[in-house]
Amino acid sequence: MPRLLRFLLLLLFGLALMTGVGYVALTRTTHRWFETDLRARSLFVVTATKQILARNWEHGHEGLADTLEDITRDERVMGAAACTLDGQRLASTSVYPLDYGCRWVLARIEQEGAETNPWTTTEALPGGRVHLSAITVAAEGKPIGRVLLVHDLSYLERREATTRNLLLAAFFVLSLGAATITMIAERLAFRVWTSELRRALSGEVTRDFKPLVGDVRALVERLASERDREARGGPWNPARLRSTLTTHLDGERVIILANREPYIHDKTPTGVRVLHPASGLVTALEPVMRACSGVWVAHGSGTADKETADARGHVKVPPGEESYSIRRVWLSEAEENGYYYGFSNEGLWPLCHVAHARPVFRAEDWEHYVRVNRKFADAVCEEVDTEDPIILVQDYHFALAPRMIRERLPRATILTFWHIPWPSAERIGICPWREEIISGLLGSSIVGFHTREHCNNFIDAVDTFMESRIDREANAIVQGARRSLVRPYPISIEWPVHWLEELPSVAECRASVRRELGLPADALLGVGIDRLDYTKGIEERLQAVDELLSRYPEFRGRFTFVQLAAPSRTKIARYRELNDRVEALADEINARWGKGDYRPIILLRSHHEPPTVFRYYRAAELCYVSSLHDGMNLVAKEFVAARDDELGVLVLSQFTGAARDLTEALIVNPYDLGRAGDAMAAALRMPEDEQRERMSSMRRMVSEFNVYRWAGRMLVDAAELRRRERVSGRLSAPAVLARAIGS
Ligand code: F6P
């Protein structure tokens, strides 16, 4: 039961109890008051008429009856009777309840041995309760008889009913008020919590697994400044991105240069199949290309790529809904080994990721890197159809291409985005060709990174290794007449994700995934989705599962972690070794905690197409992204996008760029295995309303800061830069100068 509902029920129960106890106490007290009041009134009435009563007592029935009628003029006195001391009735009013006559009263008084004056009792009559009092009448100091007074108590019952109704109304109003106040307080508390996170006003720990305060502060600054800037433009989507291109950049087509192509054609025994590679870069850029159209220049790496492309390497995509082209560039095995496996993935990749892998720099790899960069730069220049095209250069495979393109197309707008972290200047200094790398990147109009920290590191590296002026105010590097802006553009994913359109409901995904994994329908499931890469912390992730099971026995036999691991860069020994280590670790943990059919770790080592990946996201209780170092990590954002049920918990490494955006995830240090295990336990025990609070907040973030906005912001900044360059180009033109000097 959700926490809030539980609290409300408890509150209502408490209020009902208090109202009940209050009602009983109030009725008893008012009863006592009324009774005392009636005794006093009875005594007063008889005492006031004592003289007349004594006189009429002697003169008999007639006079007494009149006196008694006078006494009963008060509407609450039902009747009165005068009795002798031995129980004879001398007179009574016209209305008097016969059941409580003189004999009955005398018998009761004798039975009780009561000596109080007046003697009183409360009795029930068919029409309601009555209060009966017997007051002794005396003449010359001697008792001569008794006057019986019967009070109607129905008015008392009416008052009680009114009190009860008032109390019920008060209970209702109080309950309503309390429920409303609780819900408002809950909402406010959540708002305060999220805005506290966002504003990072306090450094105090309020929740476990909280994000780093610095990250939260940066996020909030970004949200505030961007909200102001974007407020008028509406949400970012393909249409807005297209219109940004039209209005800011004259609708020019975009050319992307990226090593990985978005569609790979592979030969299979049954024919050619199209693969969507496991790549954050592709996940982000493919929707942008669909929206903008143009050309994607990439390495043709599929076994059927050549036969599916034309003579110049062009193929129209996406299959069936063609809206842009891939220009495939062919590489020899030696080129691929040197440029891709060697310099890019054995050199730059470990250089930029703090993941305890030593970078390897070989001169022959560098030569291939230079040659292949030139080859791709040439291919880009062949694709352009204006003097000032817009070119998006992607990632560490192409650090040299921006300058090479600039040399051939001086007026091009070149936006280079570095998808992996940019480390400290000290670390960059390890690379024997650091100046060439930096100089190559400075051929760009804008160099983009995921985070401000990476931008600062880049500017430091420029400062350390290059001859240039740094405009720190504008975050720009000035070399002669050229400026390169350095900007953070946290990358994201499309929103909504088109793969979700065809997917079954969350309930069906849960059922089908558990079925295909051979798990019971109520099994708890964690999921990890990665390329098999040592930066992803897959070993640490499995060890954290081990910790979870050892610390929390309740999850043994119930919790399964499924790791979808796409084989990657397997020509590199380190990747092959990782594969073996992950397998051995999974076996070890399964041997420790497995029982019967139960295995806590399921390792699915193969490429999985996006619909399968999204089905797994939707089926899981938690997704653990444990990267040891990651520029952004789009798996985290995809998991959030997949959960339109707003359930599921993201456990996220603090060393990802995504941890700066998704501050409502459970943020962990993946090296701290015990705490990571605790975080998974917290995720599995998290009440649904808290899951919803966290997930809906993250979904708002990802939907608003989607990849169209990422691309749009870069294009808008590029357009602004272009406009300035055109204006300053015109101003510095010889004719303008001559006119200025002459005037
Ligand atoms: O995460 C960094 C990254 O370079 C992505 O930009 C890319 O999509 C991914 O690694 C996959 O790498 P590869 O293209 O070598 O398989």
Image (tube, grey):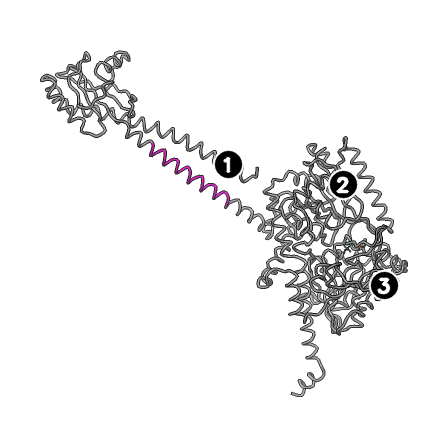
Crowding near the residue tagged with mark 1, few <14, some 14–19, many ≥20 C-alpha atoms within 10 Å: few
Query: What amino acid does circle 3 point to?
Result: Val
* Front tag of 2 and 1: 1
Q: Which mark is residue 308?
A: none
User: Given contact means CB atoms under 8 Å apart, are the residues at marks 3 and 2 in contact?
Assistant: no
Is label 2 within 8 A of ligand 1 (CB to nearest ligand atom)? no
User: Which amino acid, mark 2?
Assistant: Leu
Q: Position of residue 34 (x, y in %)?
A: 28, 27
Asked whether, in this view, residue 402 is left or right of residue 166, the answer is right
Q: State the residue lying farthest toward the bottom.
A: 742
Mark 2 and mark 1 lie on one chain; the one further toward the N terminus is: 1
**In the image, which residues are magenta?**
161-183
Looking at the image, can residue 55 be seen?
yes
> Which residue is located at x 79 percent, y 63 percent?
315
Residues at discs 2 and 1 in contact (Cβ within 8 Å): no
Q: Position of residue 140 (x, y in %)?
A: 12, 16
What residue sits right under mark 1 in the picture?
Answer: 9
Q: Residues within 10 Å of mark 2 (few under 14, many from 20)?
A: many
Judged by its main secondary structure, the magenta piece is helix
Alpha-carbon span between mark 1 and mark 3: 69 Å
Mark number displayed over residue 372: 3
SS type, badge 1: helix
Q: Secondary structure at mark 3?
A: helix
User: Which residue position is annotated with label 2?
Assistant: 542
Three-letter code, disc 1: Leu
Q: Quadrant of the N terminus?
A: top right
As displayed, is residue 196 above or below residue 132?
A: below
Distance between the Cα atoms at labels 2 and 1?
41 Å
Q: Is residue 168 magenta?
A: yes
- Residue at (87%, 64%) from the top-left corner? 371
